[in-house]
Amino acid sequence: MRIASSNKQYVNEIRFDGVHISDQSLDLLSEKMTNLYSQIQSLSGSHTLNVVFDFNFLSVRSRRLVGRFLIGISNYCTANSEKKVSVEWRYDYMDDDMKELGLAYAESSNLNFVFVGTEPNSLSKAV
């Protein structure tokens, strides 16, 4: 898994991507999400943070962690209305399970989700 940041004029982007996020990757995933939470807390003005999720596979425990994280971010943004976070959920366009997982996350949070179906290409993703 990798995390990358890119700064644009009014949007910061954080990427979470990987081919296979298993239970052995939970500590790293949790650490990256903690860092992201800190970045959201430091947002100021009209900046929006765009969080991109692009996974081929998430274990059950990883799915729960991501879900709890998104609900926590949603609650934080609701309590702090000046904080703006959007989520780009990328999935293999043939993978209904990953699409449905993103839809479930969108339904359970107040975050703005954008869904992007992509061509299968695991070679472009970091492990």
Image (spheres, rainbow, N blue to C red):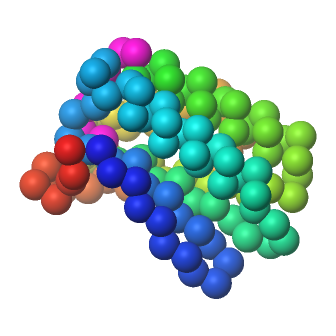
Image position of 33 with respect to 48: above or below: above
x and y, in percent, of residue 4 in the image: 41, 61
Query: Which image quadrant: the C terminus?
Result: top left
Q: Taking 6 as reference, is 20 left or right? A: left
The residue that appears at 36% across and 15% down in the rendered structure is: 60
The residue segment tinted magenta is 55-61
Answer yes or no: is residue 50 visible: yes
Image position of 11 with respect to 22: above or below: below
- Residue 45 magenta-highlighted: no
x and y, in percent, of residue 85 in the image: 67, 54
x and y, in percent, of residue 7 in the image: 55, 76
x and y, in percent, of residue 122 in the image: 13, 49
The part of the image, by quadrant, that contains residue 78 is top right
Answer yes or no: is residue 104 visible: no
The part of the image, by quadrant, that contains residue 45 is bottom right
Q: Taking 23 as reference, is 73 left or right? A: right
The residue that appears at 79% across and 45% down in the rendered structure is: 77
Query: Which image quadrant: the N terminus?
Result: top left
The residue that appears at 64% across and 84% down in the rendered structure is: 9
Q: Residue furthest top?
A: 60
Image position of 19 with respect to 101: above or below: below
Report the number of discs.
0
Q: Taking 10 as reference, is 19 left or right? A: left
